[in-house]
Image (spheres, coloured by chain):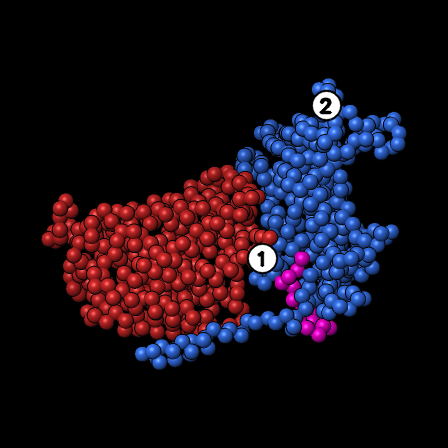
Chain colours: A blue, B red
Amino acid sequence: MKKRFGLILCCSTLLLSSCWDERLLKEIQLVFTVGYDQTENGEVAVTSVVPPVNPDIKDNKNINIYKTGHTLRDARYKADLNVSEHLDYSKLQMMLLGEELAKEDIYSFLDVVYRNAANNLSSRLAVVEGEATELLYHPLRTQFDISQYYANIIESSELVGVLPKISLQTACTLMFDPGGDLYLPYLTYNEEMARAEVSGIALFNGRKYTGTYLTAEQGTLFNVLMDNTEGSVRMTKKYTEDKQPEVANYMTVEIPNADVSIKVKDDALLTTSIKVKLKIVVTEYAPNNIVGKEKIKKIEKWWEEELKKDTLELTQIMQEAKSDGLAIGRRVAAFHPKRWNEKEWKNQFANIPFEVDYDVELTGTGIID
Amino acid sequence: MNAKNEITGMQLFFIIVQTQIGVGILSMPTDIGKIAKQDAWISMMLAGITVQIIVLLYMFLLSKFPEDTYYGMVNKCFGSIFGKLIMFAYIIYFLSVLVVSMTGFYQIIASWIFFETPKWVILLLFAVPAVYMARENVVLLARFKMLISFLLPLLFVILSWVYFHPQFLYLLPVGGTGTQAILEGIKPAIFALMGFEAYLFFGYYVKMNRKKELRKAAFATAFVTSFYVFTIITTQVFFYIEELIIVPYPVLYIMKALEFTLLERIDLIFLTIWMIIALSSFISFLFLAANTLEQFFSKGKHTLMVYISIVISYIAALLPTSISSMDKLTSILLSTSLVFTAAIPLITLLLSFIRKLPGKDIKS
């Protein structure tokens, strides 16, 4: 009996060696960053950035592979003809979309990413000014490996609250939701520093890039309105005009907590009220002396006015671009289903009057007053 | 071997839960969402109530004939010729359930983890442990199910990550899809709950304190329903409904998209563990198929019958079929399943009243 059992045990190990699906690291090249562009003749250009295989090579030459094809898959297969190993996108961290391509229906380009089970859905997306390929071929002054650099700058911008966190998966949900629009980081190239730069948030209308983007400061405000205050969100504004040196005129505050309520009224134009309760902490203000109830009140009042002005400006930009990034439409669909018209929504959105109300509370001034 | 061959109500509870929850839960939110849209959870609740009523019917039958197995009751009420015919139909039914669930298992494994591994290997790896368990008696089966039940909360724990950034607005307006759609959504919801018939078959083995213990086990379906409602709501606050419709395995897709500090692609790890749950559901049906065969031929050879059932279903599952023809078989099976789970037991009960069978009085 024991012998038989042993025999069965030995034989059954044969079943365990599943070598059909093995993927050996020595046979593949992991791509961390990829850039997509539209070429003039309607093809897709794919630039894959592969980290150097041997990290000891000091020159740190990342390999860029540039190929065009009719579909993304097509271009990827063609790229395999140039690489000694098989290109593998399952560890992708960053996907850059060229401006021209982003102005088309971007879902058609991303479909392959969602369809393949091996892909990483938490990788980041960004729109690039000009061509993604061009950006990837620019020299970069960074101590990081270039293939990981882009994912890292996006992450650090998320940390300081300039960018909302958008992964491939969250982007997909927003693309499908008619009551809310997609927004992606907008990247440019800074010639002087020889680095890429996060310049703000690219606004989409449906699945197409509108061509308008929010600046980094507006991005911060947008984040506050989206209730993304988990990172350290900071704002700097000119508080006075006459102080010397110029730096002394500015006040920097940190926003540890925001409470946003966006409500849509059931009137003719669907008036939308945005009520924000903010707690702010002064982190930098050279003239000091923030004491006394009156002075604090004055500062609070001033911030309320400033933020209200900025928010109205922000909503106007979004309305002009017909980009409903704040997902007002989702609220209409949920609370006033009778008023909800999926096809007409964008035109309706462009004419919505906004009522903005801020309630700022100064809760701290650091360890000096 | 346990000579007693009887189980407690709690054990029956877990047998039913583990028969109902299988790979189906991974795709169920999409199937119902396609029809009932954001009100899928309402459909699921209504389906749960319907199934609960059927289970009450089972309870009634079981307490009317405390000495008989289900087939014993059928034979008594329909007469032995019709009884045999009905048993034969059940054999076909259970064998097709085996084939469908094997194929479902293969499809999910082939599209998520092992793209290249041949079908026969995957199915064999599924079949071998199933045989190993199903040929044992019902007591061991029940213990196995209780043992692996600690894996069930895993789904709950992983999915709760969604609630860091939920979109509850996607659930509104409640009832917005209309009564018609919600009612139609009950059909796929009931199919997702399939496996509750285990109550009828395994209820026979509950002997001590029969009434009280049977009542305990009747909560199994309520438990599964609430588990499913949680899953549906979680997928719907994560996906926009139009997106959910094109994602066949939303639960896995959510896990694929979740980001943890240490782990990535938690879906793969989860799927590996969840296969045990899927296997457990398969084992129940394999046991039932063998049990039916055994009673049909009135021989006491349970183990042999398990081998016969697995060989038949293994070969049938291997036959080259396209996805669409498999879908067809699945939909036929699901529509007929109501005959086997609701209609025949109901007729049995009615017949027992009409023919005034000397079954045990309900009161005593």
Identify the amino acid type marked 2.
Ile
Q: Nearer the viewer, residue B57 or B265?
A: B265
Where residue A310 sits: x, y (%)?
Answer: 74, 32
The circle on residue A215 is none
Q: Quadrant of the C terminus of chain A?
A: top right
Please name the residue that numbered disc 2 is placed on: A296
For the question of whether residue B295 can be seen, the reply is yes
Q: Mark 1 falls on what kind of element? A: loop
Label 2: chain letter: A
Write the start and end of the magenta stretch as one range: A77-93
Q: Quadrant of the N terminus of chain A?
A: bottom left
**Residue plotted at (18% across, 58% down):** B68
**Residue plotted at (71% across, 21% down):** A297
Residue furthest to the top in view is A294
Q: Give the foreground label among 2 and 1.
A: 2
Specify whether A87 is left or right of B258: right
Specify whether A262 is left or right of A130: left
Residue furthest to the front in view is A367
Instruction: Locate residue B198: give its quadrant.
Output: bottom left
The circle on residue B264 is 1
Q: Nearer the viewer, residue A182 or A42?
A: A182
